[in-house]
Image (cartoon, rainbow, N blue to C red):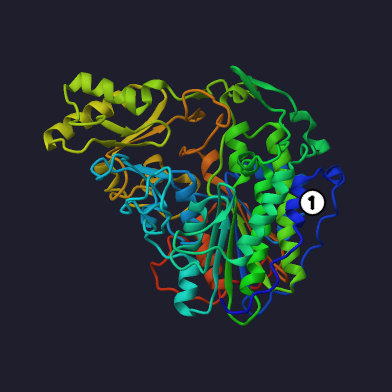
Amino acid sequence: MRSVLRSVVLPLIALSAALSPLPSLADPAPAASPAPAEAPARPPRLIVAISVDQFSADLFAQYREHFSHGFARLLTGAVFPSGFQSHAATETCPGHSTLLTGVHPARTGIIANNWFAPGIGRKDKQVYCAEDETNPQSTSEEPVVSSGHLKAPTLGDLMKRKNPAALNVAVSAKDRAVVMMSGHTADAAYWFKGKGFTSFADRALSPAAQAENAALADAIGQGAGALPMPDWCASLDRALPLGDFSIGTYRFPLKAGDFKGFAASPRMDAATTDMAVRLVDETGMGKDNVTDVLSVSYSATDKVGHAYGTEGVEMCIQMAQLDRTIGTLLDALDARGIDYLVVLSADHGGIDAPERLREHGVPDASRLDPALTSAALSEAVSSETGITAKSGPLLYGAGGSGDIWLADGLSGKQRRKVIAALVARLKANPQVAAVYTADELAKVRVPRGNPQDWTMIERVAASFNPAHSGQVLMMTGRAVVPGTKPVPGYTATHGSPWDYDRRVPMLFWRKGLTHEEQPQPVETVDIAPTLAAHIGLPEPVGTWDGRCLDIDGSRADTCAR
C-alpha cells in the first residue's frame, strides 16, 4: 500500500439506500450530461473494471430506457451492446476469467465453475475453479481459495509487472469473481462469506474490512422493510406458480439478522460498493502518477436471476437498485477527485424460468431431461456396456454443464467402449443439440472474427482445455434450462452456448471521451487489450486473444496511444 490509511469510517450511502425504501425511484433523477468532446491525453489514474454477474445484453436492452443514475453516466461513453463471452461454458468463473486477461477459457484454464478429477486423492472428486485442492483443508464446497488454476495474467498482474507500485484491488460477493479479475498479485482481495467480507486464508482483515463488517452487522441486525418497486415494474408484478411455491412478486424484505437473505438480494451490491470505496480510501488508489486497477463484481443480478428468473418484478427491482448502486460508486470517485476510466461488462447472460418462457411464447422451453444427469447416464451406459467403475460412478458431470468425465481406472478399451455408447445415447436425446469428444475438440482452432457467427464446435473449443475438460461434451438445445425441476432459490440459470447466455453489454466511460454507439459484435477478451492501450501498456503479440477497441467517438484513436 502506498499511503497511510485514510479514515475508514465512511457514510454507508449505498448500503443505507439499499436497506431502506427509495420513494424517488419512480421519479428518476436527470441523466448525466454528455462528456466534452476532447479526449484526455494522459493515462487515467485508476481503472475501474465492473462486472455485473448474469447481466445479459437482453436485460441491458430491456431496462436501458429506465436507467437514470450510474448506467446513465456510462451510456454517455462508448457503448457496445453486443459484446460476447464467445465460449460455450457461460458460467461465472470462466466468464470472469476472460474480462481482464484478454484470453478465452481455453487459455485461462478455467473451463467451468467446477470440474471433476476422478483420480484425485480425496473423496470429493469435484474441483472448484478457485481452490487449492492440494490443501488437505480444501473441498469444492468449502475451498481454500487460490488463484492457482488461472493460467493467464490479468491486467493488474501485467501492470504490477511493469511497475510494482501499481495497485491491484478487487471486491465482490463471490471469491471466484475476485480471484479471476485480480489474478495472482492482488494487493487487497475481499469477498463476502458468512457474516462479512473475508480474504485469503493467510491475510488478516484490514481496518477497512473490519469497519465494513461492523457496519453490516449493525444494519443487518436491525433488518429492513421491502425494497420499493418503481412504477415501470408494475406490469411484471404477478405470481408464477412453480409447484408448491411461486415467484414474481417478491420485494426483498430483510429479516433482522438474516445474512443469507442479505447476500442474495440487491443489498449485497450496495455493500460491495461500500467495501470498494473503503478500499479506495484505505489504499490511496488513484492518487499518484501510477495507474491502479479496481475490480468490482456485483453478484446480486445473478442471485436474483437464479432465484426468481429474469422477467419478474424481482429482476426489475434489482435493475433499479443496481443503477443507483453504480451511481454511488462513481459519485464517490468523483468526490475524491480521481481521474478514472470505467469499463462495465458481464461474465455471462441468463435465461428465464421455462414455465414463464412458455407463457411468453417459447413453447419449446423446458427443464433438463432427468435421463441426462450423470447418475442416469452412468446407469444406462453401464447396463449397455457391462462396464462399471471400481468405486463410485462410471460418469461424472453431465447435467447442464456439458462436460462428462469418465471414472478413473478404466482400460483404454473400456474407455473407448464407454465413450462410444455415451455419445450414441446423447445424440439420440432430442434435448441435445451437439456432442463432441475431447479428441475432436483438441483439433479445433479457436477462431477470430465475429463471435456471433462461430459454429457450435468453435464455441465449445474456446472453453476446452485438456487439463480439466471432460472426455465428452454435450450441448443442450435452445431454451433447455439446466436443472430437472425448480426449487426455492433456484428456478432459472445459464451455462448454454446460445446467445442469450453469451451476449453481454460492454460499456466504457472516462471524462473527456466522446460518446459512441457501436452495435457490431465484439468480445469480452477485447477489454484487456483496450484498457492496456489506453494506459500505454504494450504487450507482445500473442498476449491477447482479443483486440483493442477504439473507445472515443471522435477522430481520436485510443488504440494508437
Q: Decide: is 277 above or below 283.
A: above
Residue 455 x/y as whole percent: 41, 42
Residue 79 seen anywhere in this rendered image of the structure: no
Q: Circle 1: is it few (<14), some (14-19), or many (20+) Cα within 10 Å?
A: many
Residue 210: image quadrant is: bottom right
Residue annotated with mark 1: 68
Residue 409 x/y as whole percent: 16, 37
Quadrant in the picture for the C terminus:
bottom right
Residue 212: image quadrant is: bottom right
> In the displayed structure, does residue 339 sit left or right of residue 69?
left
Task: Give the residue displayed 24% in from the left and 23% down from the top.
Answer: 381
Residue 349: image quadrant is: top right
Task: Give the residue displayed 27% in from the left and 21% down from the top.
Answer: 379
The residue at the far top in this view is 243
Three-letter amino acid code at the position of disc 1:
Ser
Residue 196 x/y as whole percent: 60, 52
Q: Nearer the viewer, residue 493 or 128?
A: 128
Residue 219 seen anywhere in this rendered image of the structure: yes
* Element class at badge 1: loop
Q: Nearer the viewer, residue 475 or 12?
A: 12
Task: Give the residue displayed 73% in from the left and 39% down from the top.
Answer: 317
